[in-house]
Image: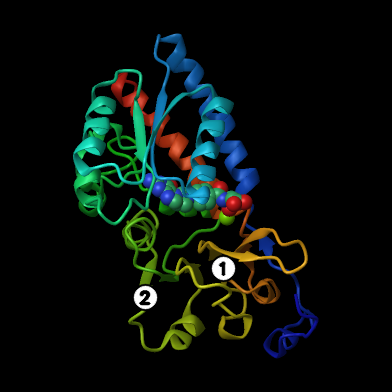
Amino acid sequence: MSNSINPERAKTPFGTPVAAQVLDGKVTAATIKSELAVRVEVLKGRGITPGLGTVLVGEDPGSQWYVRGKHRDCAEIGVNSVRRELPADVSQQELEAVLDELNADPGTTGYIVQLPLPDHIDTNAILERMDPAKDADGLHPTNLGRLVLNVSSPVNAPLPCTPHGIVELLLRHKIALNGKKVLVIGRGVTVGRPLGLLLTRRSINATVLLAHTGTLDLPELLAMADVVVAAAGMPAMIKAAELKEGAIVLDVGVSRAVDEQTGKSRIVGDVDPDVADVASWLSPNPGGVGPMTRAMLLANVVEAAERQAGIIAD
Ligand SMILES: Nc1nc(=O)c2c([nH]1)NC[C@@H]1CN(c3ccc(C(=O)N[C@@H](CCC(=O)O)C(=O)O)cc3)C=[N+]21
Ligand SMILES: [Mg+2]
């Protein structure tokens, strides 16, 4: 972090920069996991053990790492998990046959297909092949459709994990978005697009600006945003000087860089570290939205099992 004082910040009554408060995804995810563990016990008392299936195609080390983490998370809250690993050259038909097995397996109450899939696979056809009642990512077209129709909630259908994690992270820090201008950067199907739908619900009531690579004047939008959600995957693209004083900033993008000193790979977010000098709240990366995404996956698995057991989630 630089030592220079942002000139705008220096004009505040405080005179010197005050570091942003941390939107701590690690601590919040741990709280959510302990709440879910109680619900898992209730299900087990009724003879139902929730089970997550993961489907991993190919040997990308990053994807392998994420999937391992998901199984660890399940074990922590008493959820069973099964792993299906397929070679990178698996055919569409073979992959669909695995989904059919998981759809039919009563022990698998929810599952995910780790993305991205290899280019020769039709990803949308795969997502559509899933049983929407077992869709732990909330990415089946039926569940995305329910989000558009505003009938999804934990009661009726799963929500996509990262958008839900972002909303939950804000709620649990008592940050209300009613009437606020939220700039979402990135229009991907897993984050930006569904997040816009979630934030504009009446219960949250934000005004959403959805920016993307075709956006012409991003600085103009950044200057007016009360909240910025950076999900572009462009290292350190959000700079302190572009932001409104006191903005709330969520760093979602994940890029990797090799540390010159250690030679180790490390995570680089979309937000420049200097942003901590002007933001009122900042989600770190790592330690922010990533752990929340994983917690919301667990929530989807538990809620799917509750729906299957006829227990209504709240
Ligand atoms: N079907 C599917 N569902 C997904 O949810 C999905 C996916 N495919 N493909 C890849 C992305 C990426 N993703 C992350 C989840 C957790 C962290 C996470 O917990 N990160 C840690 C640090 C991780 C590290 O140190 O490498 C953190 O932010 O603190 C990151 C990224 C889920 N994804
Ligand atoms: Mg993170």
In front: mark 1 or mark 2?
Answer: 2
Q: Amino acid at mark 2?
A: His
**In which image quadrant can residue 283 be found?**
bottom right
In the displayed structure, 253 sits above or below 126; it is below
Left or right of 263 in this view: 67? left
Residue for badge 1 = 248
Mark 1 nearby-residue class (10 Å; few <14, some 14–19, many ≥20): many
Distance from label 1 to label 2 (Cα)?
A: 19 Å
Residue for badge 2 = 212
Sequence-wise, which precedes: disc 1 or disc 2? 2
Closer to the camera in the image, 11 or 128: 128
Label 1 element class = strand
Label 2 element class = loop
Left or right of 6 in this view: 47? left
User: How far across and down, in percent of the image, does residue 194 sit?
Assistant: 33, 57
Closer to the camera in the image, 19 or 191: 191
Residue shown at the point (62%, 85%) measured from the top left:
241
Whether the residue carrying mark 2 lies under 8 Å from ligand 1 is answered with no
In the displayed structure, 106 sits above or below 24; it is above
Left or right of 279 in this view: 161? left
Q: Which mark is residue 39?
A: none
Q: Are marks 1 and 2 in contact (CB under 8 Å)?
A: no
Image quarter for ligand 2 equals bottom right
Residue shown at the point (62%, 56%) measured from the top left:
286
User: How far across and down, in percent of the image, does residue 311 sit?
Assistant: 34, 21
